[in-house]
Image: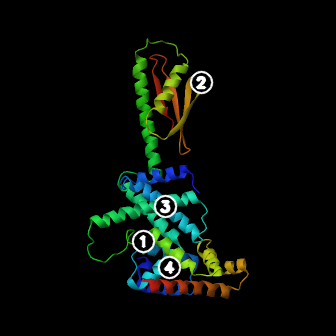
Amino acid sequence: MFSEGVRAKLLAVVRSFGRVTGGEDEDIVQEALTALWSLSESGYPVRDAEALAVKIAKNGCVAQYRRRKLRLQPLRGDAYDGGDPATAATDLSDCLEIRRRLYGGLTDTEKTCLDLRNVDGLSLDEIAEMTGKPKTSVKSTISAARRKMLEQLKKEL
Amino acid sequence: MDAMTDKNYRKELIAKYMNAETDAAEEIRLAEYFATHQPDADEAAVAKMVLAERPEALIAAGEREFDREAGACGAAPAGTRRAARRWRLALTGLAAAAALALVLLLRPASREVPPFTPLEIAESLNTIMDLGLGDIESATAVPSGANILVTVHLKDGTDLPFIMSKDGDTGTLSLASTE
């Protein structure tokens, strides 16, 4: 799917981070490409694959850096006031895997409505117009999809 | 204070979200919050779902952290790096001019301003190309009156203009950035 040029570009981005050791850089690039595949597999409309791959590779660097910090520095206490290092998902690849799993349990109509909402940023009225369904139907479809996904996640936690 | 840090506000927003009553801006705020904050235990499942719906919020948060960490260890964000590179190039251009001047000072002085020889132009371009910055794709030289306009083309698509001039008394070549 990607030329060697893109792979080389990702490698350069990863190395520019300066905080990954030799050997990890190739792994991060490979993980970025896998995550991109996972994202597109889950139905996420990838418009600029190269730009997205760079962003994902940057996330990979950050995740790797965090993992190393966690190994080296014991956590003091369990209260966090916020800030970038503490995220709901441990890293992007986890998040994408969850997305792939959750979306796998949705109907095509539910997935379409969610993507029009989340990716295209359409309002309920616009989605209704685009899909030819009443606004109330679009609203209940999205709500049902979210409840379905939440139930699944609660079972997994 | 950011309303998102208020647990009650988040609770209301999450309830609206589940009923598909939030607008796009509210949903983005929710995703951005969970992309950068540890959720409370009772919000954990919702947080994962919100981010699964909008992974770009997490991607953007990771990218910001990358730029911050990369900056902290010496690799500044792209814009800063470009500015630094321009300065470095301008300064090394001056250094190159000084080096050329040293060589040319050994020549006999002449009152008349001789035209640039092809060799001088080639030497100047080579000096610029050999600076070892790794970002230069090519350089061109175009005669303009008594001077030579040198344009350095960087790999990121930007151009850096220099003007090369010659002192008729000393034969000294100088290269100055015009930016």
In the rendered structure, are the residues bearing label 4 and label 2 in contact, judged by CB atoms less than 8 Å apart? no
The image quadrant of residue B132 is: top left
* Mark 3: amino acid: Ala
- Amino acid, disc 1: Thr
Callout 2: SS: loop
Q: Sequence order check: which comes first, mark 4 or mark 2?
A: 4
For marks 4 and 1, give the CA distance. 15 Å
Quarter occupied by residue A109 = bottom right
On whether disc 2 and disc 1 are found on a single subunit, the reply is yes
Residue B36 badge: 1
The residue depicted at 48 percent of the width and 20 percent of the height is B167
For discs 4 and 2, the disc positioned in front in the rendered view: 4
The span from disc 2 to disc 1 (Cα, nearest Å) is 59 Å
The subunit letter for the residue under badge 3 reads A
| Chain letter for the residue marked with disc 2 in the picture | B
The answer to whether residue A50 is above or below residue B179 is below
Residue type at mark 2 is Gly
Residue B49 numbered tag:
4
| Residue labelled with disc 3 | A32
On whether disc 4 and disc 2 are found on a single subunit, the reply is yes
